[in-house]
Amino acid sequence: MKHPNQVIIDLASLRHNFSQARAAFGDRPLLAVVKADAYGHGAVEVARALTDEDAEMFGVAHPVEGARLRAAGIDRPILLFCGAHPDDAGDLADQELTPMLFDLELARALDAAGRARGRVLPVHLKIDTGMGRAGFRPEQVDEVLAILAGLDHVRIDGVVSHLALADDVANPFTARQYETFAACVERVRAAGFNPRWLHLSNSPGLFGQNFPLCNLARPGISLYGGLPGESFRHLDLQPVMRFVSRIAQVNRLPAGSGISYGHRFVTERDSLVAAVPVGYSDGYPRLVTNRAEVLVRGRRIRQIGTVCMNWILLDVTDHPDVRIGDRVTLLGRDGDGLISGDELAGWAQTIDYEVFCSIGSRNPRQYLRA
Ligand SMILES: *Cc1c(COP(=O)(O)O)cnc(C)c1O
């Protein structure tokens, strides 16, 4: 059976973006962020492609995401951004999943799991230098280090923090975060630990800052051709995701016809209206109602009326050649035309990250390998 809607993932563009990120990081190692099913692009396929490109590590949010990568044969180190429940410590050991550590209960559970297996388990110590989210606070670090020093089967393999304002390149807060981070790293070393990996940067940090201390960066959105922030429009990043549907019907409606729920669009002239079987249940945001444009035959066409669960409507009055079965591109490239994630996100009052996640995870995906 054929689904009318498809997400097409261009792995050549993904690889291109990865090499752009690597060049921007001075050829130092990269941890490719593949959480949320690689922002909707498919974590297994993305991790396979980027293993070929020699990604040093992969990053996911939760242990189950890491286990899925292991089951698919991904053998690079995998970092768990949201930690793990202490009950899962044994599974982390067996699957070789490394948590960002911000919870001493987990540290103790890992120590026990490591002892039972005769192994020392790696963690990356997570410090909150100003994101105000997860992580040990700088003022807790000494106490945490003292406790970790007593856990023989846990090793601090990395020290990590996360930037809150890096998309605003000139914001001085980022430098303050780096200084706090560097001071914490000093204390980790002074306590006798020798962490191999020091990392702070997401995509905007990687492309917009220089942190001499760091030897690993964690790009996500830039790998997928998204926009890490307004100051990054000049970067040579290629869109990876394309979302397509097909015209299911074309109707001729007289002037004054109400369109879709609530009649939030009323035709001002005799109109040709095309119906496309895609809607918010497919991750196409309802908030774009009366605002979005799509590409048909390489031309931009206006979306009209309320976005339904499974339908949108297009005003094709000026494009009478449009036919049932024509491909509709809702996101990504069609010939020379492009609906960027950023543009679609703007119509939906959100960010491209969310658009990629919701569209990519709800539709059948097809991979272009080229
Ligand atoms: C999601 C995430 C990243 C990647 O951020 P992008 O802006 O997508 O590059 C890096 N580090 C952490 C801790 C994250 O949660």
Image: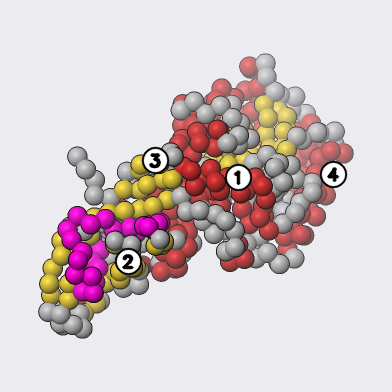
Cα separation, mark 2 vs mark 1, equals 31 Å
Left or right position of 128 against 81: right
**How many residues crowd around disc 3 within 10 Å: few (fewer than 14), some, or many (20 or more)?**
some
**How many residues crowd around disc 2 within 10 Å: few (fewer than 14), some, or many (20 or more)?**
some
Cα separation, mark 3 vs mark 4, equals 45 Å
Q: CB of mark 1 within 8 Å of CB of mark 3?
A: no
**Residue kind at label 2, given as amino acid type:** Arg
Residue 326: x and y in percent read 23, 57
Residue at 58%, 45% in the rendered image: 18
Q: Which residues are magenta?
A: 309-335
Q: Which marked residue is nearer to the observer: mark 2 or mark 4?
A: 2
362 versus 347 height, above or below: above
SS at badge 3: strand
Residue 333 appears in the rendering: yes
Cα separation, mark 2 vs mark 4, equals 57 Å
Residue 284: x and y in percent read 34, 58
Locate the N terminus by quadrant. Answer: top left
59 versus 170 height, above or below: above
**How many residues crowd around disc 1 within 10 Å: few (fewer than 14), some, or many (20 or more)?**
some
Cα separation, mark 3 vs mark 2, equals 24 Å
Q: Would the CB of label 3 be found within 8 Å of ligand 1?
A: no
Q: Which marked residue is nearer to the observer: mark 3 or mark 4?
A: 3
The circle on residue 253 is none
Pick the front one: 20 or 83? 20
Q: How is the image coloured?
A: secondary structure
The residue labelled by disc 3 is: 367
Sequence order check, earlier mark of 3 and 2: 2
**How many residues crowd around disc 4 within 10 Å: few (fewer than 14), some, or many (20 or more)?**
few
Residue 36 appears in the rendering: no
**Residue kind at label 1, given as amino acid type:** Ser
SS at badge 4: helix
